[in-house]
């Protein structure tokens, strides 16, 4: 019977810790509560550009279930968008000159349905639509002023758009701040409700 070599030790079967797997049993690496992200979450350290970009992309991701409309079983906004798109396409194919009212009604229906869906999603914290929604008041204001000037005069002066630009920018900035703050509050409430 051969003797074992006493000078050579066998390999230890003890597992070494894996830094990618150091997290709680119910969590994945990279989630907010995991140990792998602990240095990034401690207070006092400023977020890196990649972390800020990840936070901005996180706003585009949906949290929880899509908010239901007050008329829930009936997909009214979706039907409005579909009918408006069909009406606008038919008016475009038949000729815009003779079907201008149908084209305007189709585009208006699409815009109305889209605004309802995006506003509902934004105000409930489901998904952020801050940039689009903050531009809408400026577009409406600018359009109303131009139409009012065209109603009183036959043509709008060339300097009118340039004069309205600072007001449009101010409206967008104010609405962006208000809508962003509302979305952040709603997103926080939705996240905490999901954690309970």
Image: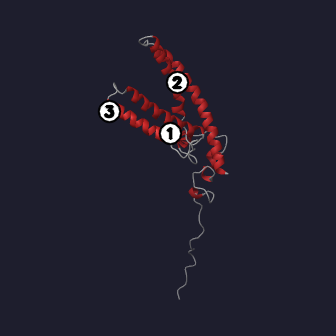
Q: Earlier in the sequence, mark 1 or mark 3?
A: 1
Front position in the image: 99 or 183: 99
Mark 2 surroundings within 10 Å by alpha-carbon count, few (fewer than 14), some (14 through 19), many (20 or more): many
Rendering coords of residue 122 (x, y %): 57, 38
Q: Is residue 158 left or right of residue 45?
A: left
Q: Is residue 183 above or below residue 95?
A: below
Q: Are marks 2 and 3 in contact (CB under 8 Å)?
A: no
Q: Calculate the distance from the C-alpha at mark 1 to the C-alpha at mark 2.
A: 23 Å
Rendering coords of residue 16 (x, y %): 59, 63
Badge 2 marks a residue whose secondary structure is helix
Q: Earlier in the sequence, mark 1 or mark 2?
A: 1
Q: Quadrant of residue 179?
A: top right
| Tag shown at residue 164 | none
Badge 3 marks a residue whose secondary structure is helix
Identify the residue under disc 1: 77
Identify the residue under disc 2: 138
Q: Is residue 161 above or below residue 50?
A: above
Badge 1 marks a residue whose secondary structure is helix
Mark 3 surroundings within 10 Å by alpha-carbon count, few (fewer than 14), some (14 through 19), many (20 or more): few
Identify the residue under disc 3: 93
Q: Calculate the distance from the C-alpha at mark 1 to the C-alpha at mark 3.
A: 24 Å
Q: Residue at x 62, y 58 (%)?
A: 26
Q: Earlier in the sequence, mark 2 or mark 3?
A: 3
Q: Is residue 49 above or below residue 108?
A: below
Q: Residue at x 57, y 30 (%)?
A: 176
Front position in the image: 9 or 153: 153
């Amino acid at each position: 019977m051969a003797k074992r070599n006493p000078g050579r030790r066998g390999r230890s079967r003890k597992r070494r810790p894996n830094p990618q797997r150091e997290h709680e049993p119910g969590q994945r690496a990279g989630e907010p509560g995991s140990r792998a992200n602990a240095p990034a979450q401690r207070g006092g350290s400023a977020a890196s550009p990649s972390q800020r970009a990840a936070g901005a992309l996180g706003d585009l991701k949906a949290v929880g279930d899509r908010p239901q409309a007050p008329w829930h079983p009936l997909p009214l906004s979706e039907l409005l968008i579909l009918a408006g798109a069909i009406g606008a396409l038919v008016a475009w194919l038949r000729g815009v000159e003779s079907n201008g009212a149908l084209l305007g009604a189709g585009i208006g229906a699409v815009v109305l349905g889209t605004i309802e869906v995006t506003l509902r999603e934004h105000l409930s914290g489901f998904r952020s639509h801050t940039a689009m929604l903050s531009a809408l008041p400026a577009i409406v204001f600018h359009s109303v002023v131009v139409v009012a000037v065209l109603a009183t005069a036959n043509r709008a002066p060339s300097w009118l758009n340039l004069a309205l630009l600072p007001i449009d920018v101010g409206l967008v900035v104010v609405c962006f701040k208000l809508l962003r703050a509302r979305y952040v509050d709603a997103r926080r409430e939705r996240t905490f409700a999901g954690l309970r």
